[in-house]
Image: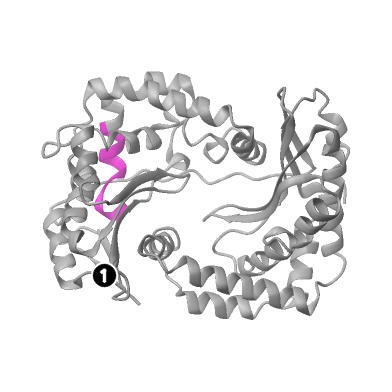
Amino acid sequence: MFNKITFQNGLRILTVSDKNTEAVTVLILVKTGSKYEKKEENGISHFLEHMFFKGTKKRPSAIAVAETLDRVGGIYNAFTSQEDTGYFAKVESSNFELALDWVSDIFLNSLLPEEEIEKEKKVITEEINMIYDHPMSYVSVLWMKLLYGDQPAGWHIAGNKENIQKMSRQKLINYRNNQYCPQNTLVTIAGNFNEKKATSLIKRYFGKLKKGKPISKLPVVENQQKAQCILEERNTDQTHLFLGVRAFNIFSERRYVQSILSAVLGGMMSSRLFVEIREKMGLAYYVSTEVEENPDTGFLVTRAGVDNQNVEKAILAILKEYKKISEKMITFSEIKKAKDNIKGKMALLLESSDAQASFYASQELLENRILTSKQILEKINKVTRADVLRLAKDIFRPENLNLALIGPFKDKEKFQKLLKI
């Protein structure tokens, strides 16, 4: 079970107690990411996240920051998404105070040294190069560009090399001052810890943090009227593709239906697409269907890596399954298996303190509400076969199709012509 407290300055605290573990996780989430950026500063959220590991007054170097938790076997990292930025430390429960001190220190007191900013420009440039050189990863960047185009939702979270080279300390400070304010921040503690002590420590660290005026993100514009395709020519032995449709966001009750639909299509090794494309046709090593739901966007997509000679065959096979599931109800056996699969995965996921912290914190930050796993499963269990069919009919329409692919091809039109249901 969880408890929530809001301080006078607007800072929210979530505590999720679990005495059946020897671990505890401290997670700080800030409601800012690449969707909150201006075009000329795209990548600044991610850049700032990197800089928080470069030293504080108390821990004046990157090595000093790292050694603090390395000495106790802690797991620590940070991440940036379109919607939020997070910093976390997971330790053995007796080291809870150390973990909270460490996370709060890098969050509140990072020095952002000029010389480290210059070095980090090279590091982030190499990160961008790494993603680009890995087609299996980079196709997801193309996918977002295809869906959302030249607006924050369609930009690369890491930014572009030109922006990275122009990043300055003052820009980073201004962005931090605007966005990293208490009313935009959530501190979550999950695992085995003393709640009273945790709340007292958080108040000591964060209580004097002054309110700010965080920037709001621009609304995402979606106006798709016909099937879309984006192709990047690469001399690869395998073509990597994303094929899918726009769907529902996290505030829609139909998100639970699309979870079932996704599981039946390609969420399991016994799902329709895995069996058809890998087991029967032997076209791909990896093939899966996933849904992504954000506060203002959502999509369902099938991803696969196939031999260059079999790309058209694989695309047609995926479209065939989309068509089939939008014309005829899934079986009783399939819907039961999908529900049981979701239930089992959720139970296994929430065994760890870091997963519990993320589960509760992301809901609170992005939705301003929290559903327990039991409440979510109750909604999943109410989904009917007719619900799945209605949803499939609504989203699997010719004008809603999108295809992003990377491979040794010049002619985008031949793939565009395949996008029919």
Badge 1 amino acid? Asn
Drawn side of residue 250 relative to residue 283, left or right: left
Picture coordinates of residue 197 (x, y %)?
14, 68
Query: Can the viewer see residue 172 in this picture?
Result: yes
Determine the image quadrant of residue 249: bottom right
- For label 1, the SS is loop
Drawn side of residue 376 relative to residue 418, left or right: left
Q: Which quadrant holds the N terminus?
A: bottom left
Q: Is residue 239 magenta?
A: no
Drawn side of residue 17 relative to residue 84, left or right: left
Magenta span covers which residues?
173-187
Query: Looking at the image, which is closer to me, 308 or 4?
Result: 308
- Disc 1 crowd, CA 10 A, few/some/many (<14, 14-19, 20+): many
Query: Can the viewer see residue 40 in this picture?
Result: no
Q: Indicate whether 233 appears above or below 401.
A: above
The residue shown at (18%, 63%) is 94
- Which residue matches tag 1? 192
Q: Is residue 182 magenta?
A: yes
Query: Looking at the image, which is closer to me, 162 or 341?
Result: 341
Picture coordinates of residue 215 (x, y %)?
37, 43
Picture coordinates of residue 417 (x, y %)?
88, 37
Q: Indicate whether 258 appears above or below 308.
A: below
The residue shown at (45%, 24%) is 126
Drawn side of residue 86 relative to residue 194, left or right: right
